[in-house]
Image: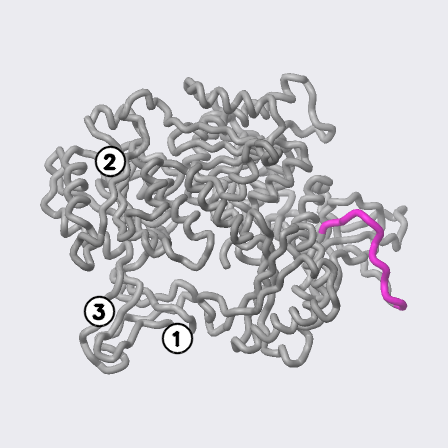
């Protein structure tokens, strides 16, 4: 399955350290020892025996772990000679991520590699390598557009400073063009100096986006600017062969630009000189399974270690990044990031290019259960009749969140989760969005046989149906009836469905687009002049301290979809608007949205967090336990907490361990879930404590009273509590 070792002159029995993906909580250690016939440089990919299997491993630096008395090292099965060793920068990134996020070295290292490498034989690998080496035609560079004064200032600052940079630009201010120019400058800098890295690989750039559906349109812009052969994508929506081909192109230096989602932060790029993290505030950059790393934070670390500049871009930065980019004042040296502000939209010399005006509808003055207020309906009709497009935001898919029987109080609860099954009218199913359990909608109440079952609440599917009825008599300028469409996870399941629907929006075929947060960020819709958020109040009073930040970002990003083409808006004699239907028009979030004043919102939120000693003024970790019963889950966490105090674990004096509690949705797929919060004013103290606590967590797990425990994990810097 690989190129076998066969050097007869090699020294037999030399030990090498290899990182392999050992079973979780196996206690086998970060590295294993294997016998090699010849010296292997660190970073070499090898195939090694592990139990009865043969697995992929990475040769690591350092002395090989000592073997138990009487034990002989098993020989390496083969070496993937066709792939150059992974360099020291990559290995240090992996080692840091494993250390910081409390995972095993082998787990992080192997998860960072494309899956096909684990199974390819030498013939298949050679074929892939030949395909990766195929020459591509470089396209003619697209003509450069004129830069605004704000773009020029931002690029100038990036050119003369080392960063990291927070590019704080309003929606439509031209952040993407800044990325393009900075990437071009990074790729050309070494060439202009006639200098190449020692390994012969030219300068490379990594551009990250939060979600897969944002990749194609951004990739198109990069390919138009730099040519198809220079740009590759890397995200989980690709097939395994595609991911391997992109990874090999980046690793060999053939690909100058890698465009991808959070997994791309681990791409092997020996010539890396620039990292761009677009929409850096987005929660999608935080991995929620396995090693729960933050790709944004790892990008900052990688940039510093590899001497690459890092640009974080957003119209609504995370409060952590905002605080880290604060200017210096008396008594405060300021943050470690350099903040670059681009407040104006491109071509915004008149009102046509200005940011959308906020229209607030007080739903307390509307009839109960009103979904679309009369003023909003009138505005939608007016826009459609002028040939303009509108967008409706509701971050809840399905037809209704729950079905309810008023006679016996039955609800469509999931039998396997502490959650309701969502009503999907299109296929007449009740679906749990947590475990995937699905059943047909009952004809009568399962509890009392009453035929009166009511849908409570609204989802995007219901909004599409209602708006179709309400606008049924409205005609477009060409005399055609209005077309309402929906984009959410349900309508984009089939391959290519999202691209086809987005193409319809861009071509003007769709008049009113209804969607979840999928359509609220990153898309450049040129004809949308009105955006409306119809039910945002649920997040205003959430127990999660980050909920206001997420809601403000979502609403401001959504408003940025309106009026992006200043010339089109001016030609229509119109003005872009953001409509907000809320029962709390005096809320601080609404006031900040009205002025498009992120700085004021951030200042208020940061003061609240400072007063409450919350991040970024404190550092947190969660320990989560999943078990067959809630008692076992909480019992494990409490026992681990007691063990930390009994053993006076290093750093405990600076760490607060809160009592274990159930998660907000405490049961998923018949597994009970509990969590325990750890908090410290010192990141270093928290890390020291977590590292020293790990052996006690393993020991606690093995105790008989925790037999029903399914799994446990540590989540450092959690985004949801």
Relative placement, left or right, of 173 versus 87 is left
Q: Considering only order in the chain, which callout, 2 or 3, is on the residue closer to the N terminus? A: 3
Q: For this rendering, which residue is in front, 184 or 684? A: 684
Q: Quadrant of the N terminus?
A: bottom right
Is the stretch drawn in magenta largely helix, strand or loop? loop
512 within the magenta span: no
Location of mark 2 (residue): 508
> Are discs 3 and 1 less than 8 Å apart at CB?
no
Q: For this rendering, which residue is in front, 548 or 76? A: 548
67 within the magenta span: yes
User: Which residue is outermost to the front?
Assistant: 330
Location of mark 1 (residue): 415
Q: Secondary structure at mark 2?
A: loop
Q: For this rendering, which residue is in front, 446 or 500? A: 446
As drawn, 236 above or below 710? above
Q: Would you call the spot at circle 2 few (<14 residues within 10 Å), some (14-19), or many (20 or more)?
A: some
- For image coordinates 85% across by 54% down, the residue present is 15
Q: Secondary structure at mark 3?
A: strand
**Pair 1/2: label in front:** 1
Q: Which mark is residue 454?
A: 3
């Amino acid at each position: 399955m690989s190129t076998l070792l066969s050097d007869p002159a090699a020294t037999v029995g030399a030990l090498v350290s290899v990182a392999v993906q050992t079973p979780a909580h196996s206690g086998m250690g970060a590295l294993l020892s294997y016998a090699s016939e010849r010296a292997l440089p660190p970073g070499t990919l090898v195939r090694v025996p592990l139990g009865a299997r043969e697995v992929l491993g990475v040769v690591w630096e350092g002395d090989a772990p000592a073997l138990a008395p009487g034990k002989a090292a098993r020989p390496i099965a083969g070496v993937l000679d066709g792939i150059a060793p992974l360099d020291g920068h990559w290995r240090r990134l992996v080692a840091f991520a494993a250390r910081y996020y409390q995972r095993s070295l082998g787990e992080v290292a192997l998860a960072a590699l494309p899956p096909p490498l684990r199974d390819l034989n030498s013939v298949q690998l050679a074929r892939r390598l030949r395909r990766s080496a195929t020459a591509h035609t470089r396209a003619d560079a697209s003509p450069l557009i004129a830069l605004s004064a704000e773009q020029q200032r931002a690029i100038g600052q990036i050119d003369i400073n080392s960063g990291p940079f927070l590019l704080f630009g309003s929606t439509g201010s031209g952040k993407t063009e800044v990325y393009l120019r900075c990437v071009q400058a990074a790729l050309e800098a070494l060439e202009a100096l006639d200098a190449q890295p020692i390994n012969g690989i030219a300068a490379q750039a990594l551009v990250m986006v939060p979600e897969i559906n944002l990749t194609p349109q951004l990739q198109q812009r990069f390919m138009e600017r730099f040519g198809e052969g220079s740009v590759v994508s890397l995200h989980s929506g690709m097939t395994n062969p595609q991911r391997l081909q992109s990874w090999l192109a980046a690793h060999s230096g053939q690909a100058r630009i890698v465009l991808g989602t959070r997994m791309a932060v681990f791409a092997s790029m020996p010539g890396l000189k620039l990292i761009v993290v677009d929409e850096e505030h987005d929660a999608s950059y935080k991995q929620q399974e396995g090693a729960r790393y933050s790709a944004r934070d790892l990008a900052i670390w990688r940039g510093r270690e590899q001497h690459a500049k890092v640009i974080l871009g957003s119209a609504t930065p995370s409060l952590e990044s905002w605080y880290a980019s604060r200017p210096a004042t008396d008594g405060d040296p300021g943050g470690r990031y350099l903040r670059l502000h681009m407040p104006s939209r491109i071509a915004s010399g008149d009102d046509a290019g200005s940011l959308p005006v906020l229209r607030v509808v007080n739903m307390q003055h509307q009839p109960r259960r009103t979904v679309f207020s009369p003023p909003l309906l009138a505005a939608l009709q007016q826009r459609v009749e002028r040939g303009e497009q509108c967008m409706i935001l509701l971050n809840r898919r399905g037809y209704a969140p729950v079905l309810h029987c008023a006679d016996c109080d039955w609800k469509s609860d999931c039998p396997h989760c502490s959650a309701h099954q969502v009503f999907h009218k299109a296929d007449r199913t009740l679906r749990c969005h947590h475990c995937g359990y699905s059943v047909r909608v009952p004809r009568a109440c399962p509890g009392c046989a009453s035929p009166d079952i009511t849908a409570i609440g609204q989802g995007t599917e219901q909004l599409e149906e209602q708006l179709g009825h309400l606008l049924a008599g409205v005609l477009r300028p060409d005399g055609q009836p209005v077309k309402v469409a929906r984009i959410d996870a349900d309508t984009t399941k089939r391959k290519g469905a999202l691209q086809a629907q987005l193409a319809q929006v861009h071509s003007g075929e769709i008049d009113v687009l209804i969607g979840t947060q999928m359509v609220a960020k990153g898309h450049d819709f040129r004809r949308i002049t009105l955006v409306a958020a119809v039910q945002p109040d649920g997040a205003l009073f959430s127990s999660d301290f980050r909920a206001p930040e997420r809601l403000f970002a979502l609403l401001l990003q959504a408003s940025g979809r309106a009026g992006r083409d200043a010339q089109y808006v001016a030609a229509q004699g119109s003005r872009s608007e953001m409509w907000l239907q809320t029962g709390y028009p005096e809320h601080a979030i609404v006031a900040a949205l009205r002025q498009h004043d992120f700085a004021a919102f951030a200042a208020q939120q940061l003061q609240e967090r400072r007063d409450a000693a919350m991040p970024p003024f404190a550092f947190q970790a969660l320990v989560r336990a999943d078990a067959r019963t809630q008692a076992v889950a909480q019992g494990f966490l409490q026992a681990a907490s007691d063990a930390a105090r009994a053993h006076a674990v290093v750093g405990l004096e600076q760490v607060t361990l809160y009592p274990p509690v159930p998660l907000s949705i405490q049961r998923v797929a018949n597994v009970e879930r509990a969590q325990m919060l750890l908090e410290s004013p010192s990141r270093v103290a928290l890390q020291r404590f977590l590292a020293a606590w790990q052996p006690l967590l393993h020991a606690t797990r093995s105790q008989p009273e925790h037999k029903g425990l399914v799994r446990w994990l540590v989540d450092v810097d959690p985004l949801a509590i």
